[in-house]
Image: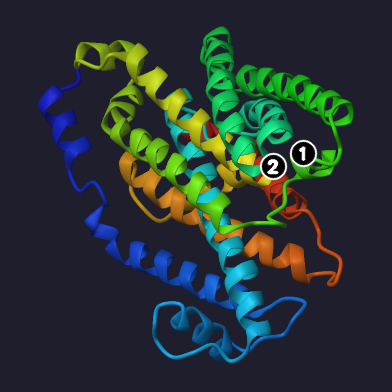
Amino acid sequence: MTNSKTVQAETDAAPFHRGRRWAWWAALFVLIVAMATSLSVGAASIGPRDAWTVVLSHMGIGSAPSVAIDGVIWAIRLPRILLGVAVGAALGAAGMGLQGLFRTPLADPHLLGLGPGAAIGAVLGAAGGGIQGAIAGGAAAGLIAGFAVRRVGRSSSGDPARLILSGVALGAAFSAWVGFFVFGLDRSSVAPIEFWLLGSLTGSTWRAFGTAAVLISVGTIGLMTAGRSLDLLSLGESTARSLGVDVGLVSTMVILGAGLITGAAVGAVGVIGFVGLLGPAIARRLVGPNNKSLIAMSAIAGALLMVVADTVARTAVSPIELPAGLVTAAVGGPVFIWLISRMRRWT
């Protein structure tokens, strides 16, 4: 019989896994290096010194090397990188939250249909309100899609294979509706279908970053708040209930949090798959099983993956820019297959 005091101690201990504190510093350091590298590379070659001089000049330290360099760094690259960090963090945290709720490492906002569902609202929002409307519409549709995913989770009876297959079917249906709306609306106000279904950080702005960052922060905090309850849920629903967990409330909180931040991310950059799968896979190897720690580290890992993927997307075949979703799918697809082959380790 599970000792409730033991469980309480284990789930409350070291919310950021102090035994592996080096992992947090290492992850943050690598993320900063990736951001700094991305800031300096692109179609216009700008040295790291000039790039950081621009950033410092906007903080009141020194002056920019030239108006042209200032425009490239401050108006184009920096908001794009920061939006990539926000989007990657959202997808990583959402993926880990869903994996903790459904107790499978295969759960991902894209594979479960959350991303395509949010894209419907984002397209409709973009038609009437530009990028702000897209983010708001995506967030609202993400919440609605979340309830659909919850229903799918209940019908899967705890079987990960049924959950993923049902989610993929749901996502395919949502993607079809995205296509119908894109082709039926004014093409001058709505981005093309490849943007919504493959994702891209092209056209990132400070305004888009600010709006998305607020929604993503709120949703991510909500997911981390549910961390301890997710730890107890890993013992089984009946055991969690006996320890005082309101399973229905926790499920709703996680689904709403994941739907909100996924929707905000999709509204800003379209659907970018597999970040929510790869981020948690990396986090599990860096921190302990505490879900609060895993969600936080998944957010950092997701941000790193998004920055790297976007940098590759805009430099690999320059001056042509690839959709960021192609880059993440190229890596995420094989990892998904690998996780399926090793799924027994988590079940």
Left or right position of 321 against 42: right
For disc 2, the marked residue is: 270
Seen at 52% across and 10% down, the residue is: 154
Relative depth, front residue between 12 and 58 = 58
Q: Residue furthest left?
A: 5
Relative depth, front residue between 321 and 235 = 321
Looking at the picture, which amino acid does disc 1 mark? Leu
Looking at the picture, which amino acid does disc 2 mark? Gly
Q: Which mark is residue 197?
A: 1
The secondary element bearing badge 1 is classed as helix
x and y, in percent, of residue 142 in the image: 57, 27
Q: Can you see residue 56?
A: yes
Seen at 45% across and 24% down, the residue is: 256
The secondary element bearing badge 2 is classed as loop
x and y, in percent, of residue 179 in the image: 84, 28
For mark 1, does the 10 Å Cα neighbourhood hold few (<14), some (14 to 19), or many (20 or more) residues? many
Whether tag 1 and tag 2 are in contact, CB under 8 A, the answer is yes
Q: Earlier in the sequence, mark 1 or mark 2?
A: 1
